[in-house]
Amino acid sequence: MATTFDTNGPPKSSFSVSKLWTDKKSRGVIVQIIAMAIFCAVLAYLANNVVDNFEDLGKPFGFGFLQQPSNYDINQTLIEYNSQSSHGRAAVVGILNTLLVAFCGIILATILGFILGVLRLSPNWLVNKLAYCYIEFVRNVPVLVHILLVHGILVHSLPHPKQAIGVADSFFLSNRGFYMPQPLFQPLFWLVILAFVAGLIYAFWYKRSARIKQAETGQQSPVFWVMLASIIGLPILAYFLTGFPIEWQLPEQGKFNLKGGMAIKPEFLALWLALSLYTAAFIAENVRSGILAVSKGQSEAALALGLPRKRTMNLVVIPQALRVIIPPLTSQYLNITKNSSLAIAIGYMDIVATIGGISLNQTGREMECMIIVLSLYLFFSLTISTIMNWYNKRIALVER
Amino acid sequence: MNLFRYAATAATTIALGASIQANAATLDDIRSAGELKCGISTGVPGFAFTDDSGAWNGFDPAICQAVAAAVLGDTAKVKYTTTTGKTRFTALSSGEVDVLARNTTWTFSRDTDLKLDFVGVNYYDGQGFMAPADLGVSSAKELDGASVCIQTGTTTELNLADYFRVNGISYEAVPIETGDEARTNYLAGRCDVYTTDASALAAQRASFEDPSAHVLLPEIISKEPLGPLVRHGDSEWADIVRWTLNALITAEELGITSANVDQMATGTDNPEINRLLGSEGDLGAMIGLDKAWAWRAIKAVGNYGEIFDNYIGASTPIGLERGVNAQWTDGGLLYSPPFR
């Protein structure tokens, strides 16, 4: 690049300072160095400012407060927690609540998104337009509004626990949550778990040997049915043989609320549904674009080769569509995880509400709490990205 | 560690802003800006509300108006910033507001660890419970298994946990961000009882469609001295806010009202009134203000008793009795140090 052909004479090779700027390549490097220096200077200035201000205020910096008792209660805890537990434990409760809603949201949004995406391509005019209207409506309203709307509907339209909608005296729906029987595991239950693990191992061994058999002899085995029988059938059989080692604790009316059983709180329901419904609309569009990206000639060629329609879909269309769907799907998964931080709007105790909210406010450690919340979200997002990138690589086109 | 500290602080700098001036002369800043930055709540009937013209008024904004009158000579020169239970302390310590007048409880850790200065108490409160009358509950001790609406980031949240733990009863906490949301959730039946400072409960109840359908339970489970607060580190500014509040309280004790303050300012036979209103000595100069500072504050918003009666007293829909908030001469807790 540096040596351009000059009609007036041979290119000069001697070095001069002014040449650093006239040369395109070195100029690029210089500009980048200057930009980086300015960026670092601004960052250093801001950091220095904060450190100075903290010193002026006399506020020490440290994470010792995490060991102190939190003194507040949390209504949804996946691990043992009470007001005497530490702020650190409260943070863990918050992390688990965030992960729970993100995980459930990702699953529901993926299922709904794929269904909607396929419906959007349906030749049936009504189905097609209904899916279209849903997607356009949901995508163009902020997710916070969806969360508040769903929460409002759940809290205002569902009955009080005293008038809860009950099914078979086991399931109750009220504005304080969805109550269901809680399983109490009896001693013999470990045999059922053992059966499940054994079934799982056998199923995958069978699947592998079936593939080898098909590669060698061309014979196909009933993989799906054998896997179903060993993963689900075996534990059920064990459950019967050991004499039903689960007791169900049914929810019943208490003085104020339904007592006993398991309860899904309206806050969790609202957040989960709102995030899933919202993100499903985006996933639907990803799925639609993915399917449309596979040219018609592909499936026509497969059919012409004599592959049945189902195998054409499974072996030709979907693998190619997934290549287009996965990368944007990753960012939708990240969106669900990050959008779950809006939980505080309806009082769902996620990571932002516990360590980034109440703990922050009670201890006054804005900087430390924000650093914790920030690094956790970064960690979650990078983990999801890594997993999805690994999956993307696995299904990517293998070129020789 | 130092490197980590720099890296870590850099990341959240934006959240804190770069304008913290802990030791700056707040009074000079307010004078040069020509306005007082005042942090208030997002709205509690009687305590902080917008009137028909959209201006903030109430028991808490009155403190800011009094300070603005004393410092700037105009109650309108106040810039109100609404804060939630969670954002209020950050707003104050980052310099977003100069004074926080927002039913905030004076506690040890807030005064020391959070590096804030409480300048006094303008309302002695305690935490109570409100329940629908038809729930049939007559004591907080009967609340085993109940759902309780609670504003997050408040002392009430901690008192609640303590109270139920000590009494060995269980409950479901329903955390809520603002008073308005608490009201909606409580009325929708998401929770059985709503707990916060008794004054705020009375205020909320007054705004219900049918206040008589809700009862306040007899238990008061905590001490909640509410008062205005400023940042740590500028004692001169803290003095101004503290003594403006004291001036309003002393004015009531000495019988100075917004109606008779002009006449009293010309001189009386009570030397303390004369010192307070500036006709004798020069107390104002000692806190960097002029002689008439207290006169302006009282003239603008009235004495403590007038503010109480105007916004939350027995004649208003809120209907709070003076109770422990009466002057010490009437058996209450209000007791201002002397102006001498």
Image (cartoon, coloured by chain):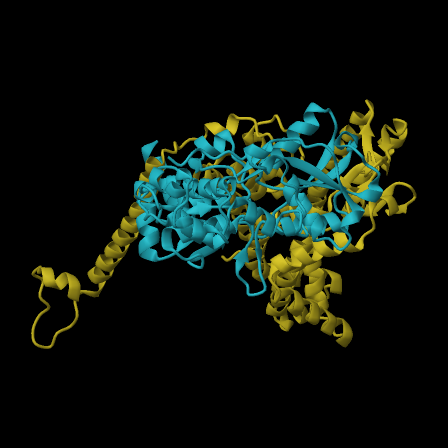
Outermost residue to the front: B269
Q: Can you give x and y, in whole percent of width and height, for residue B328 in the image?
A: 55, 32
What number of labels is visible?
Answer: 0
Q: Can you give x and y, in whole percent of width and height, for residue A126 in the image?
A: 77, 74
Pick the quarter of the image with the N terminus of chain A. bottom left
Residue B128 against residue A25 in the figure, above or below: above
Position of residue A178 in the picture relative to residue B55 (left or right): right
Q: Can you give x and y, in whole percent of width and height, for residue B200 in the image?
A: 64, 44
Chain coloured yellow: which letter?
A
Question: Is any atom of residue A222 visible in this view?
Answer: no
Position of residue A243 in the picture relative to residue B252 (left or right): right
Q: Residue at x 57, y 62 (%)?
A: A324
The quadrant holding residue B159 is top right
Question: Is any atom of residue A334 visible in this view?
Answer: yes
Chain coloured cyan: which letter?
B
Position of residue B256 in the picture relative to residue A269 (left or right): left
Outermost residue to the right: A168
Position of residue A379 in the picture relative to residue A222 (left or right): left
Q: Nearer the viewer, residue A195 or A301?
A: A195
Q: Can you give x and y, in whole percent of width and height, for residue B85 in the image?
A: 55, 44
The quadrant holding residue A189 is top right
Q: Nearer the viewer, residue A213 or A368?
A: A368
Residue A71 against residue B183 in the figure, above or below: above
Q: Residue at x 71, y 43 (%)?
A: A207
Q: Residue at x 74, y 71 (%)?
A: A130
